[in-house]
């Protein structure tokens, strides 16, 4: 399984792109950054997107990607999967002919570029050869993480934005993960704010790791707010976790 980090930030700056990951050049996890990270040929291969939640740093490029498809004449259709609350938010607040044209009806209601598909947490579904299950995560908006298994049996857990979550680790008890993408958004001194906002600090991340019954192959740590990035990195390194990678935009890993 190939993991390409398109963006791993919550705020866009010249050196930081918003959250998106591309698996095996075709399955997109969140849609904060697409066009600024991928050439046209790679964009044309994307057919499916798993969205963790509707916050802008995770969906910002979805409307522009829909327009790219129309403008570039690739004739591709994209299916966006998420929980009903997120799908409803996209319909109501984004593809509503006010903020952006309703690409769920363009070029026609029968054959739209964007198809929105509601999924239910805990229920296995299949996407482009991957077996996927969504799990509720703790955040300020309705949100899920995804357990994704490819045809080789490689398993990646992508949690998006998520605070401490005992129920998740109980549900996953005994599941062997090859990789986990987990966040550390703020430094330890902002732990109170992180808990309030449904995020982790390095210290809180360590507590989550201690709750896991089986250790994942690799921890991929994401989502540090750009202004706190150096401090978060310093605190993560101090945790001394050997199989941990602190993600940066543009990196590619084989899981
Ligand atoms: Zn975020
Ligand atoms: Zn969020």
Image: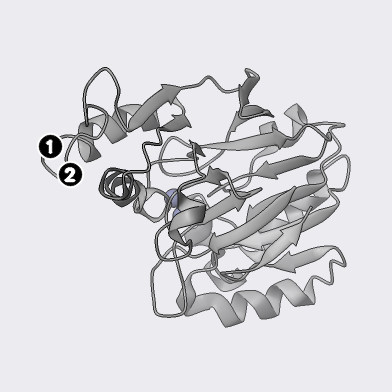
- Judge by depth and name the residue closer to the eye, 208 or 80: 80
Q: Residue at x 71, y 52 (%)?
A: 2
In this view, 163 is above or below 152:
below
- Judge by depth and name the residue closer to the eye, 131 or 185: 131
Q: Residue at x 88, y 67 (%)?
A: 242
**Horizontal and vertical percent position of residue 60:** 34, 53
Colour basis: one colour
Q: Which residue is mark 2?
A: 100
For the residue labelled by badge 2, is the local secondary structure a helix, a strand or a loop?
loop
Find out if the beta carbon at label 2 lies less than 8 Å from the nearest ligand 2 atom. Answer: no
Left or right, 201 with reference to 1: left
Q: Residue at x 86, y 37 (%)?
A: 176
**Horizontal and vertical percent position of residue 221:** 67, 61
**Horizontal and vertical percent position of residue 254:** 78, 57
In this view, 138 is above or below 91:
below
Q: Residues within 10 Å of mark 1 (few under 14, many from 20)?
A: few
For the residue labelled by badge 1, is the local secondary structure a helix, a strand or a loop?
loop
Q: Which residue is mark 1?
A: 97
Separation of marks 1 and 2 at Cα, in angstroms: 5 Å
Q: Residue at x 61, y 70 (%)?
A: 188
Q: Which mark is residue 43?
A: none
Q: Residue furthest left?
A: 98
**Horizontal and vertical percent position of residue 243:** 85, 63
Q: Mark 1 and 2 residues: CB-CB less than 8 Å, in contact?
A: yes
- Judge by depth and name the residue closer to the eye, 170 or 32: 32
């Amino acid at each position: 399984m190939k993991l390409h980090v398109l963006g791993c930030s919550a705020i866009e700056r010249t050196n930081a792109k918003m959250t998106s990951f591309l698996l095996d050049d075709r399955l997109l996890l969140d849609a904060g950054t697409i066009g600024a990270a991928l050439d046209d040929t790679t964009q044309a291969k994307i057919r499916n997107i798993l969205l963790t939640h509707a916050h802008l740093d995770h969906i910002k490029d979805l409307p522009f990607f829909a327009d790219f498809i129309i403008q570039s004449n690739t004739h591709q259709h994209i299916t966006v999967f998420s929980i009903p609350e997120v799908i409803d938010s996209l319909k109501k607040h984004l593809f509503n002919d006010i903020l952006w044209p309703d690409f769920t009806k363009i070029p026609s209601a029968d054959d739209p570029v964007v198809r929105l598909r509601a999924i239910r947490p805990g229920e296995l579904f299949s996407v482009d050869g991957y077996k996927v299950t969504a799990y509720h995560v703790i955040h300020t908006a309705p949100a899920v993480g995804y357990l994704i298994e490819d045809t080789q049996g490689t398993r990646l857990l992508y949690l998006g934005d998520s605070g401490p979550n005992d129920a998740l680790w109980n549900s996953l008890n005994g599941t062997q993960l090859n990789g986990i993408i987990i966040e550390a958004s703020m430094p330890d001194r902002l732990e109170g704010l992180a808990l309030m906002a449904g995020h982790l600090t390095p210290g809180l991340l360590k507590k989550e790791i201690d709750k896991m019954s089986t250790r994942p192959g690799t921890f991929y740590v994401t989502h540090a707010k750009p202004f706190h990035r150096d401090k978060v990195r310093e605190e993560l390194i101090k945790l001394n976790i050997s199989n941990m990678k602190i993600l940066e935009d543009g990196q590619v890993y084989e899981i």
